[in-house]
Amino acid sequence: MKHALSKVRHALTTYSAVDLRNFLNFVALSMKDRYLGSRLGLAWAIVSPLLMLSIFTFVFGFVFKSKLPGSDTSLSYVIWLIAGYGPWLFTAEGLSSSTGAFVKHSALIRNISFRQELLVFAEALTGIVPLLVAVSFLAVLLVADGRTPSLSWSIIPLILLAQYILVCGLGLILGSINVFARDVMFALPNILLVVLFASPIFYPITAFPQSVQHITAYNPIYVILESYRAPILNAEFPSLWTIGYSFACAIGVFLIGMMFFLRLRPYFDSRL
């Protein structure tokens, strides 16, 4: 374990300006490849989540007219729902892309020498677009509901950083396994669907049995999503415990992911 952590520490402390340029190039390449061949191109990155959020607003706000306890309008439920679902899109999109990063860019790995973990870091960032769309959409809904974004929204970039670190760590683990077992990419959508409904996004945590609530309350994905809801819904900063727990889980998963990746990386060339 000590040797593995030493390798991770060395890997994380030896990045250069060249690695930063490679990372930015990989981010641009990932976004372009995602919508390659379409007429609208990158515009689909905005249109797709915007359409989904609009459907949610129509269905839950005007068809089912769902309401939160103590709320007079159905729009409050829609805002609550999207405040959790928007950040979930970042996790789902980023994890789906980062899991396939090594296989997708196998030609680069075989022919060019570079820090291969940068592929995962770049692919994990692709979920930023639907998240930004969701936050902008929420700002409009809040105004329509008679509220305005508050100063507490300034904490969102910090929450996003914890979420990004967590997605990168999971992406390193799943992406490394995917090199040797391509079934991971096929199983991932089903796993994400289970996690989506296991993490209270469409319903409050109080809908769970009391015994399950205690377990779910420590689910890092749920804690991070609730950290978004605090400033957006209640104009409050998340508690220090919430922020600290989110970063502790994210950094722990990231370190495990780096150790996992560094252990398997020497065998990538024979399987890509």
Image: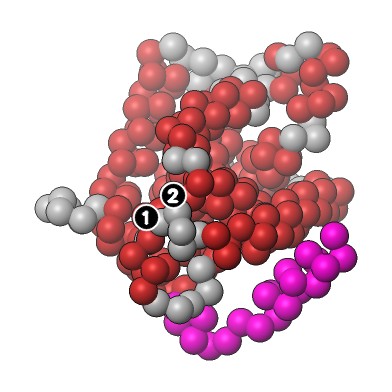
Alpha-carbon span between mark 1 and mark 2: 6 Å
Q: Quadrant of residue 112?
A: bottom left
Residue 123 visible in the current orientation: no
Give x and y (percent) for residue 91. Answer: 54, 45
Give x and y (percent) for residue 64. Answer: 44, 12
User: The magenta stretch spans which residues?
Assistant: 1-22
Reading the image, the residue beneath label 1 is: 104
Give x and y (percent) for residue 134. Answer: 45, 45
Quadrant showing the N terminus: bottom right
Dot 2: element: loop
Q: Which residue appears at 39% of the width and 69% of the height?
A: 110
Label 1 crowd bin: few (<14), some (14–19), many (20+), radius 10 Å: some
Residue type (three-letter) at the residue carrying disc 1: Lys
Q: Is residue 164 left or right of residue 32?
A: right
Q: Nearer the viewer, residue 87 or 254?
A: 254
Q: Which residue appears at 69% of the width and 44% of the height?
A: 224
Give x and y (percent) for residue 97. Answer: 44, 50
Reading the image, the residue beneath label 2 is: 100
Relative to 182, does residue 43 appear above or below in the rendering?
below
Q: Is residue 53 left or right of residue 226?
A: left
Label 2 crowd bin: few (<14), some (14–19), many (20+), radius 10 Å: many
Q: Nearer the viewer, residue 244 or 198?
A: 198
Dot 1: element: helix
Q: Nearer the viewer, residue 222 or 183?
A: 183
Q: Quadrant of residue 51?
A: top left
Q: How many marks?
A: 2
Q: Main secondary structure of the magenta part?
A: helix
Say if the magenta span includes residue 28.
Answer: no
